[in-house]
């Protein structure tokens, strides 16, 4: 069954990723789009000096090669994070670059700052050392920093490929972080026991209960693009702190609002728990905190500064929202600062859609949180996007669509085999998920999958909604 079932998702780069899957459950989907129980995932950070095997351990836990692994120290420079599951517990796992406290090199300082951000955000920290190497001053400095952080920490003596290395790990007792866990990320030795230890330290699983009738909206974006000002304007009071200093918002605060008969929950993206120099490392903590907000929302208002245009960081947040399959609206704030004529918005929309590429299915709204211009339209647009996000289309309508698509453009034959699509159904919503049954699901070309997606959007008005296409053998 697993070999005949295909799940087509988009990657960060916009390419289609094709994976054979065993079931409909994916690690990234821990939230019901229709309200009810939502699980807040705890965060586990992997830290240590360069070349101790942090990324290898990250890959071992995830059971796939996600982080780049190399013998050259410093390969992991940015963040790597994904959802890990063990014995029924899900948690967010973060891999960090090698820490070199005291190194004046700018790159080393940037990597160190990112690791410190991960430490400040983590519920549990894995401090990885090399069991085959001598204890160094860098290890001691990192250990002192972790002790001062007050976070729960597990000392991991990696590269203990067999029992002969276990006794070598005892030298790290002097770090004052308890008993070292001797493991081998390379061969997987004792990795299951380590995961058991991690799960035992995670905060108790908590499911926040939300009113299923309330649409949960995350307001995300780079610092200083006007997220808090926008929420203030929407709720009509100074609930969030507004400042010209980037990173003012420290904690996520939910704001409740009702428009007519519809309830909304607005979530401002939290900033950092501690003060950091964020010039070089701003993208790291934006992504880390935005990912938490996006996991718990139905619709994301992705705010950017219209006077500056769409930046690479803005696009990364859009990619994150799409990875979590949230409904999305692109909000061009500070429209009052843009010199414009009657055609400016039209020209900017064309330019933005060109830059967005595969994410150009979002509605773009031009507002000014300062003056209030068009702010009142956002909640209505969010409600409409939510309705598309959760809509269920009749099977007869979808198959009527399929017949028309096949008449317009049948799938190409591949490897001398005729590819047929027999019928389609929609088993899930939030986002809308469509399962196509075919005689050769693995042979369906990517260009044809894109064709089907575009036609689905046109036929069923799926603006602002990511969709999933799955292909099964008939």
Image: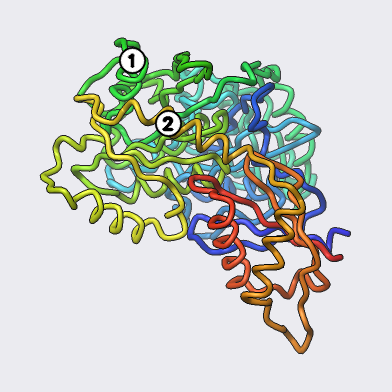
Quadrant in the picture for the N terminus: bottom right
Residue for point 36% across, 36% down: 221
For residue 14, side relative to residue 365 (left or right) = right
Residue labelled with disc 1: 240
Residue labelled with disc 2: 117
The secondary structure type at the circle numbered 1 is: loop
For residue 181, side relative to residue 299 (left or right) = right
Residue for point 80% across, 60% down: 5
Asked if 355 appears above or below 363 in the picture, the reply is below
Q: Where does residue 62 sit, x and y in percent of width and height?
A: 68, 46
Residue for point 78% across, 74% down: 420
The coloring applied to the image is rainbow
Asked if 48 appears above or below 407 in the picture, the reply is above
Q: Nearer the viewer, mark 2 or mark 1?
A: 1
Residue for point 80% across, 62% down: 472
For residue 278, side relative to residue 361 (left or right) = left
> Neighbour class for label 1 at 10 Å: few (<14), some, many (≥20)?
some
Residue ranking furthest to the right: 1
Identify the image quadrant of residue 389: top right
Quadrant in the picture for the C terminus: bottom right
């Amino acid at each position: 069954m697993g070999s005949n079932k295909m799940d087509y998702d988009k990657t960060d780069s916009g390419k289609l990723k094709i994976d054979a899957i065993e079931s409909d459950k994916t690690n990234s989907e821990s939230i019901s789009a229709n309200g009810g129980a939502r699980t807040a995932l705890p965060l586990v950070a992997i830290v240590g000096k360069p070349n101790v095997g942090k990324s290898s351990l990250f890959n071992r836990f995830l059971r796939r090669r996600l982080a780049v692994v190399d013998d050259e120290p410093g390969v992991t420079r940015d963040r790597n994070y994904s959802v890990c599951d063990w014995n029924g517990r899900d948690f967010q796992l973060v891999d960090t670059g090698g820490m070199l406290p005291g190194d004046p090199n700018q790159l080393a300082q940037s990597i160190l700052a990112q690791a410190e951000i991960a430490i400040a955000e983590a519920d549990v920290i894995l401090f990885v050392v090399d069991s085959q190497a001598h204890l160094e001053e860098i290890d001691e400095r990192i250990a002192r920093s972790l002790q001062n952080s007050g976070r729960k920490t597990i000392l991991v003596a990696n590269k203990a490929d067999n029992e002969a290395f276990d006794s070598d790990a005892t030298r790290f007792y002097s770090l004052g972080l308890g008993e070292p866990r001797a493991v081998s990320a390379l061969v997987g030795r004792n990795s299951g026991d380590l995961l058991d230890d991690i799960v035992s330290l995670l905060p108790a699983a908590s499911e926040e209960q939300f009113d299923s009738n309330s649409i949960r909206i995350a307001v995300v974006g780079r610092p200083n693009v006007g997220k808090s000002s926008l929420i203030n304007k929407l709720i009509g009071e100074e609930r969030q702190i507004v400042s010209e200093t980037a990173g003012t918002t420290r904690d996520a605060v939910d704001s409740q609002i009702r428009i007519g008969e519809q309830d909304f929950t607005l979530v401002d993206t939290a900033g950092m728990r501690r003060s950091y120099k964020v010039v070089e490392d701003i993208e790291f903590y934006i992504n880390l905190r935005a990912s938490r907000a996006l996991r718990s929302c139905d619709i994301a208002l992705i705010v950017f500064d219209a006077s500056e245009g769409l930046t690479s960081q803005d696009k990364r947040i859009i990619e994150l929202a799409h990875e979590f399959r949230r409904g999305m609206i692109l909000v061009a704030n500070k429209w009052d600062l843009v010199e414009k004529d009657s055609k400016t918005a039209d020209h900017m929309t064309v330019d933005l859609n060109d830059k967005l590429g595969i994410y150009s299915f979002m509605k773009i709204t031009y507002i000014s949180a300062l003056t209030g211009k068009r702010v009142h339209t956002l909640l209505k647009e969010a409600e409409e996007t939510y309705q598309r996000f959760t809509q269920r289309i009749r099977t007869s309508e979808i198959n009527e669509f399929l017949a028309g698509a096949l008449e317009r453009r049948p799938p190409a034959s591949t490897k001398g085999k005729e590819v047929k699509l027999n019928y389609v159904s929609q088993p899930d919503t939030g986002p809308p998920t469509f399962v196509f049954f075919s005689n050769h699901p693995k042979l369906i070309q990517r260009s044809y999958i894109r064709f089907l997606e575009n036609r689905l959007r046109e036929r069923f008005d799926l603006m602002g909604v990511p969709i999933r296409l799955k292909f099964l053998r008939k």
